[in-house]
Image (spheres, grey):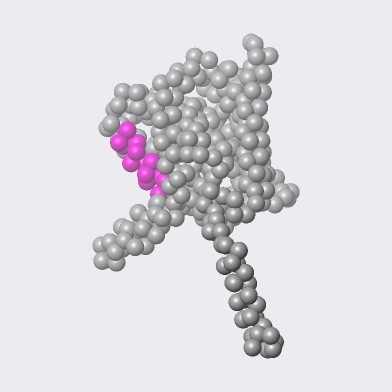
Amino acid sequence: MAKLAGPQFFNMFRGALIGTAEAVPGISGGTVALITGVYEKLIGGAGNLTSAVRIAATDLPRGKGGSRAVAEVKKVDWGVLVPLLIGMAAALVLAAKLIAPLVKEEPTNAYAVFFGLVLASLWVPFSSSGRRWRPLDYVLGLAVAAGAFVLTGLPPAQMPTHPLIVTAAGALAICALVLPGVSGSFILLTLGLYEPTIDAVNERNFAHLGAFAVGCVVGLALFVKLLKWLLENYHHMTLVVMTGLMAGSLRALWPWQDDDRTLLAPSGETGLTFALAGVGALVVIAVLIVEHRAKKRRESAPAGRGRHARVPAPDTDTDAGADADADAGAGAEFAGDPRGR
């Protein structure tokens, strides 16, 4: 699998951005993964790992060994995936302590930044679908956007923190993590389980976190393989749907809304709010420019100049001349030239 540009600390930074996004209701970690260029790498790696677990579960009891499972594991680009996961885990814990309370204290300004970020990031799936959008694609995208708009307007519920319910919530949240435009934290907020889960992270409530983790594993196993298959076989149509999801989910990030998610007209310090939305959009544009330039540099780099390029040992002039004479003689003999006889 192709390596991503940038050192491992940059991949950790990408993972930290994804983890931070997942701690904030309304912004999707999948959206940030798209912006930073690691989305399909994450989906592919997760798909390979779930395949490895499934193959091992069927092959080992039958005495077939683990060679097929190991082959799937080797397909994962661990040099990219491990730094991403480390960054995600560390940022998720820190964001739960630092950013989530900030969003609660300054919701209008915080959501303005996120609104601009997601709005600008619509360009990523729109331009990455592989071909020009047709009228039917726009119709599908608008239909999906309308559905996402309605779903993100549902008022929050209050579900009990029973382990089975927490497990089911974990399965839904992890599906939202890997699906751009849908926020895992927003799903938890809709179910009334966002604050209990954040509290469980801060208070190290391992019973709650264990049930949530089980749900994440189950949801990942069921959903990520489907998404991986869709990206491989229906790449354009899948990204059309993702664009619609991201567009419709902007409703959840509208800076002016009440506790029941009713949209309100702009009020208060509207100039500052719109300026912060512009800052969020500029951050995405800057990231996309950096990624585009890095891609151009990789494409324009001469072949064989990588750090693993093989450099032949220098030959002496005598050896080179002898090799040239021998090659000329062999070629002449093969062609029937008398000089080679």
Q: Is residue 203 left or right of residue 242?
A: left
- Please indicate whether residue 54 sits to the left or right of residue 232 in the image: left
**Residue 152 percent location from the top left of the image:** 54, 32
Is 202 placed above or below 8 here?
above
Magenta-drawn segment: 209-224
In the picture, residue 291 is in which quadrant?
A: top right
Residue 211 magenta: yes
Total count of labels: 0
Q: Where residue 318 appears, x then y in whole percent?
A: 59, 67
Q: Nearer the viewer, residue 107 or 291?
A: 291
Q: Residue furthest top?
A: 268
User: Percent x, y for residue 97?
Assistant: 41, 21
- Residue under the point 37% across and 44% down: 217
x, y percent for residue 197: 37, 28
Is residue 177 found left or right of 279 in the rendered image?
left
The kind of secondary structure the magenta stretch mainly shows is helix
Q: Specify whether residue 322 is in view.
A: yes
Magenta-span inclusion, residue 126: no
In the foreground, 167 or 214 = 214
